[in-house]
Amino acid sequence: MSEYFNVAQVFGEDVFSDRVMQERLPKKAYKALKKTIEEGTELDLATADVIAAAMKDWAIEKGATHYTHWFQPLTGVTAEKHDSFITAPNPDGTVLLEFSGKELIKGEPDASSFPSGGLRATFEARGYTAWDCTSPAFVRHDAAGAILCIPTAFCSYTGEALDQKTPLLRSMEAINTQALRLLRLFGNTTSKKVTPSVGPEQEYFLVDEKKFLQRKDLIFTGRTLFGAMPPKGQELDDHYFGTIRQRIAGFMRDVNLELWKLGVTAKTQHNEVAPAQHELAPIYAEANVAVDHNQIVMQTLKRVACQHGMKCLLHEKPFAGVNGSGKHNNWSITTDDGINLLDPGKTPHENMQFLLVLVCILKAVDTHADLLRESAADPGNDHRLGANEAPPAIVSIFLGEQLQDVLSQLINTGIATYSIKGGTLETGVRTLPSLAKDATDRNRTSPFAFTGNKFEFRMVGSRDSIASPNIVLNTIVAEAFCEACDILEAADNFEDALHDLIKRYAREHQRIVFNGNGYSDEWVEEAARRGLPNIKSMVDAIPTLVTDKAIALFEKFGVFTKAELESRVEIKYESYAKTINIEARAMIDIASKQIIPAVIKYTKSLADTVNAVTAAGAEASVQIELLNETSALLSDTKAALSKLTDVVEQAAGMEEGPERARFFHDVVMTAMSELRAPVDKLEMIVDKEMWPMPSYGDLIFEV
Ligand code: ADP
Ligand code: MG
């Protein structure tokens, strides 16, 4: 039985937190650092030296031997290079442990092997990592010992962003500036800073490690490329919120403990819809910290799973025909003095500031629905979006009954005079307390839903960084705020202008609002009538980053330069092609080396049986029928395998870029499904003992 621990005591114990800084830094250094964190002032090198020394001493007390600049290049995962604290030995053979301000602030990793999309000429391999003091440093304990991890941004020699963090921080500045303008218009003179708050709900699968290791597809690609459906799927709805089995509970306990030590506010855990699927949600945090913490969550889930003899699958669609995994990105905007700009209050119709914020968001999402869609695009998510389990690939906003009604009043009569009330929930049981009911029910099918005091963007894939969606959200809303402020600041009569603007935005952008069932076919047709984009795949989504509209948006708010956007487009096409190429090659490998040989063995055993049974004078028609069926499927498999091999070879000869990515999407993916079809049928026929890998049933029902 595992030991008990006190959450309050372990929480944040491995974080170089504000409390630790207060304790360990001289007052002057602490003040200077706080000013940098809060106002972005530059930190002088002398102060950086003091902070670095304190950080090093603290980390060494935690057992750290190394430090690393921890960053998020455009590979989708984090990167790190470890340096120990030791200096060259003294004449007496001893070493000192040192860490300077310069080492804290700046790193120079050789960047030539990270994706740069042509931003960094190959002869100029230098890249820089720069300390992001707004996300706290932490000590991570793992098999390598203990390592001081310093969150950093990563850019090229000429200052172009090569990572996720840099544009995210830029977008946070943009929304801060514009939201403050908006607040000042409403007479707020006290709030000093506005930050987006983000709470990501992380879904994942757990499978047994031994079985995982028998599946080359899972090993190489993170998803199954073959696999017939088990007799039982998720149709009984008995897994969602079901009792958590002991093996999983033990895993969750250790995940929580590790996360709490690192200051990640792991809060909610439960079984998800699909068998073997689970969810973890932290309490929301500032966007930048939330993005870093989500990376820590994903890494921790993987590491702890291994310690428990399991593997954590973060892929968006590990199993065909079974619900995939997403990441709901809850987003709101909060001031430093605790005002949530998305809080409607009890009477939203009277809350003009809220209504302005709301219609600005409608405008932002309507204008840039394509960019939001793109921000959730990755190869794995192509299997989810629009596939009747996740939100459709069409971006729309769910407002709920109460806000929809206020909006309709505004559009129809020009003023909103009342808000629908929630009332109380009657259970009909006297001993149960009567509950105050929300004015609005939940809607689970909307990609972008208002949920009380935040928006929940539900398109994001489980494996993806949440940086991109938040970069887009922050920037598009900053743009809408900016345009509204331009108008309102110039108005002679603020009240009238405000009123007109809210009404105009509500009317002009009401097409983006949809409160019905997002999974239905009618919605797809209706959305087309409304002219809303329905971007079906990542390959279709990528070009939205470099439309004139997108370039103007991102350049205006200093979030991306045109060159940075172009480089990202290049990287995305390449990474799409690489991903599908690996999947296709894995399929070829598995089909030729495992499946076809296994089926041949099976046909041989059938043939032997037919001969033996016939020789014994009995009738073997069933065996013969099975043999014929198997042989036919085997020849289909062989034909599909040859075709897939051909198209993969063809793709290998193509130049990197959009055409090649599209070829993978249209041609290679089709050939992959054609190979999968007969193999999945064979799995249902061939003797289980002879099938070369664990089945879906083995993987998801026997964790
Ligand atoms: P759900 O019912 O949607 O599954 P969860 O409790 O699983 O809800 O997750 C909701 C997430 O939203 C949590 O991470 C929570 O901290 C976050 N959240 C709550 N309020 C806000 C807010 N104002 N801004 C951003 N995120 C929020
Ligand atoms: Mg949830």
Image: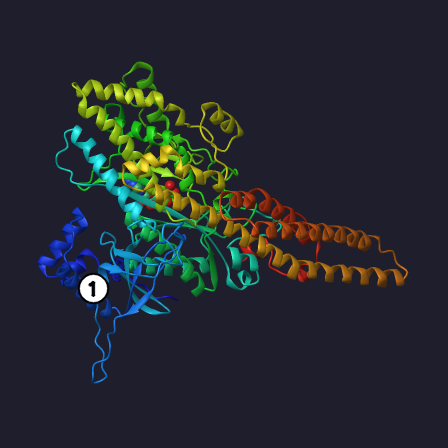
The mark total stands at 1
Residue extending farthest to the right is 617
Residue extending farthest to the front is 123
Question: Mark 1: which amino acid?
Answer: Met
Color theme of the render:
rainbow
Residue 680 visible, this orientation: yes
Q: Is mark 1 within 8 Å of ligand 1?
A: no
Q: Is residue 168 above or below residue 33?
A: above
Q: Position of residue 28 (x, y in %)?
A: 9, 57
Quadrant position of the N terminus in the picture: bottom left
Please tell me which residue lies in front, 143 or 8.
143
- Left or right: 562, with 226 as reference point: left
Residue extending farthest to the top is 413
Q: Residue at x 30, y 34 (%)?
A: 477
Quarter of the rendering containing residue 444: top left
Q: Is residue 440 above or below residue 648?
A: above
User: Judging from the image, what secondary structure is the residue with disc 1 in?
Assistant: helix
Q: Position of residue 125 (x, y in %)?
A: 35, 58
Q: Is residue 683 above or below residue 194?
A: below
Q: Is residue 57 above or below residue 262?
A: below
Quarter of the rendering containing residue 175: top left
- Left or right: 80, with 222 as reference point: left
Please tell me which residue lies in front, 428 or 239.
239
Q: Please tell me how crowded label 1 is: few (under 14), some (14-19), or many (20+) other residues with Cα within 10 Å.
A: many
Q: Which residue is mark 1?
A: 55
Q: Position of residue 471 (x, y in %)?
A: 33, 42
Q: Position of residue 507 (x, y in %)?
A: 34, 20
Residue extending farthest to the bottom is 92
Residue 439 visible, this orientation: no
